[in-house]
Amino acid sequence: MKNSLVNRISAEIDPIGFLEATARTVGASAKNPLGIARATGDFAARMGKIPGAATRVTLGLGDAPRCPESARDRRFSDVAWNENPGYYTIAETYFAARSYALDLIEAGEGDPATTAKAKAFVEMVWDAISPYNSPLTNPKVLIKAINTGGKSLVRGAQHALSDVATRNGKPLRVDMDAFTVGENMACTPGQVVYRNELMELIQYAPQTEDVHAVPMLASPPWINKYYVMDLAPNRSLIEWAVQHGRTVFAISYRNPDASMSSVTFDDYLELGIRSALDVIQEITGAPKVDLTAVCLGGAMSAIAAGTGDERIGNLTLINTLLDYSDPGQLGLMTDPDTLDKLETMMAKRGYLPGSSMADTFDILRANDLIFDYWVSRWMLGEEPPAFDLLAWNEDATNMPAAMHIQYLRQLYGANLLAKGEFEICGETVDLSKFPGEVYVVGAINDHVVPWTSSYAGARLFGDGVRYVQSNGGHIAGIVNPPNKRSWTAAVGEPEAPEQEPMPADPAAWRDAATVQEHSWWEDWVRWYTPRAGERQAPPTMGSEANPPLAAAPGSYVLG
């Protein structure tokens, strides 16, 4: 009883276990006097160089040397940090102290998971107290305050009070009034042609005179809503596929509540992808359906393909983790102790609130998703931008308790899928036996699915895989319409009937890859065009058995 209470309190206060890991690591550091002495010596040496360097700045004797951390941190790019001796001293002292704190953590020499958590927590704390985040030590804030006669600080204070009152202290990051689902987001024309207790299936209206014979199912994650794949006109992957001759269907999952607490991973296969395939084949008469999937939707699509479902044609997986041996930063949050706390927390509600999931991803990129908005909104007094990706990101969804803990324990925790031991609906999943061709996208700046890990997952399918690397991160790597900043790295030509074998070492693949100045969307069309069947007249919208129920984007996306 006592342990249960402790676990429940711990889960609410510190579900990831940052404080416990830091305390344990600090305790271990105290037992390593040599490591402490080494770290202290390095700190003293760095601090000893600052006065002389600041004097050079004062006397105008040229640029003083900046520490590597300061030079590569975009927050400290303002000229004042380099040419004003006061700001120079503040920045160099801050980075020296931050490095000292991290060196003391490294001196703990504990188990890697505990040390990694402690290091992440210390980095987050030091990022939070950065001089950039204070109105007294950020030159940009002071200059704007002077230029506006202090009005920027007044506006910032008003914004901060509003965010504390209405958003639990989280700064508003996007102008939500600028976007409406179904009007300027998730607005590719289509019809809901099927609905069950878990998902709605949308069929998109054709935009070409004829279409490829093989229809496509868009399989989104249910961590967020499906329209990351149909974000906005000219920024929609679904629209892009429709305009390039595909008959596209998409799953829109229901936002779980307490009534769905017992929904399992098996249910997402049976009521999600398998039910969608039934309806698509009934409407189109096609013997095969290609799957195009993102993140968790990609994992589920790969699992469906690995069960031997002969209805699945070819597979496209975007920023998808299949081999969980190196899950990146999320590995900090999927160790057994953290999962125990998470299970305790979810047991109270029957689901993981979308806000908790959003907070987790915010923590992974706190500088970009939290602290930058302290400055822009609360100190500079700026209004939030109208940015579709951020608007979608704010539209969070819950996760059913049973499904989520199963997913985290069996895939993240035990890596059963990569081991060939994962079972679903009574079947063992074997990705190597999937007979179709596979197109896998990894984004170079993905912090959720590191590209090297998505690469390792692609190799589970064996030969016949085209792996491409795109610019952007986990989300921007999905929403990647052709533009001047787009690039794609790949080996060989997409139209080739046989793709080049993937070497075991991702670095060897990267060395052999050619970088093209175009989006992976363009490469993808070239890949699927010879593989998607002959051109024919578009199928009807729905059928007698599955008539249109409502206009896209349907009702589940609004929940």
Image (cartoon, rainbow, N blue to C red):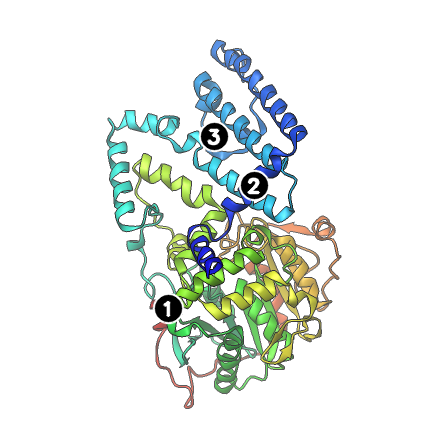
Query: What amino acid is labelled 2 in the image?
Result: Lys
For residue 299, which numbered disc appears in the image? Answer: none
Look at the numbered discs 2 and 3 and tell me whether their residues touch, using CB distance below 8 Å. no
142 with respect to 451 (left or right): left
Above or below — where is 445 with respect to 537? Answer: above
339 with respect to 194 (left or right): right
Viewer-nearest residue: 345 or 287: 345
Check the image and name the residue furthest to the front. 2
Above or below — where is 274 with respect to 228? Answer: below
Query: What amino acid is labelled 3 in the image?
Result: Phe
Q: Quadrant of the C terminus?
A: bottom left
Circle 2 or circle 3, nearest the eye: 2
| Residue identified by numbered label 2 | 119
Look at the numbered discs 2 and 1 and tell me whether their residues touch, using CB distance below 8 Å. no
Residue 316 in view in this figure: yes
* Coordinates of residue 295 in the picture (x, y in percent): 54, 62
Viewer-nearest residue: 526 or 377: 377
Residue 293 in view in this figure: no
For residue 557, which numbered disc appears in the image? Answer: 1
Look at the numbered discs 3 and 1 and tell me whether their residues touch, using CB distance below 8 Å. no
Q: Secondary structure at mark 3?
A: helix
| Residue identified by numbered label 3 | 76
In three-dimensional space, the C-alpha distance between marks 2 and 1, rounded to whole angstroms, equals 38 Å
Which residue is depicted at the point 73% across and 59% down? 502
* Coordinates of residue 330 in the picture (x, y in percent): 55, 53
Earlier-in-chain disc, 2 versus 1: 2
* Coordinates of residue 450 in the picture (x, y in percent): 60, 53
Query: What amino acid is labelled 1 in the image?
Result: Val
How many other residues sit within 10 Å of disc 1, few (<14), some (14-19) or many (≥20)?
many
In three-dimensional space, the C-alpha distance between marks 3 and 1, rounded to whole angstroms, equals 40 Å
Circle 2 or circle 1, nearest the eye: 2
Which residue is depicted at the point 32% across and 57% down? 179
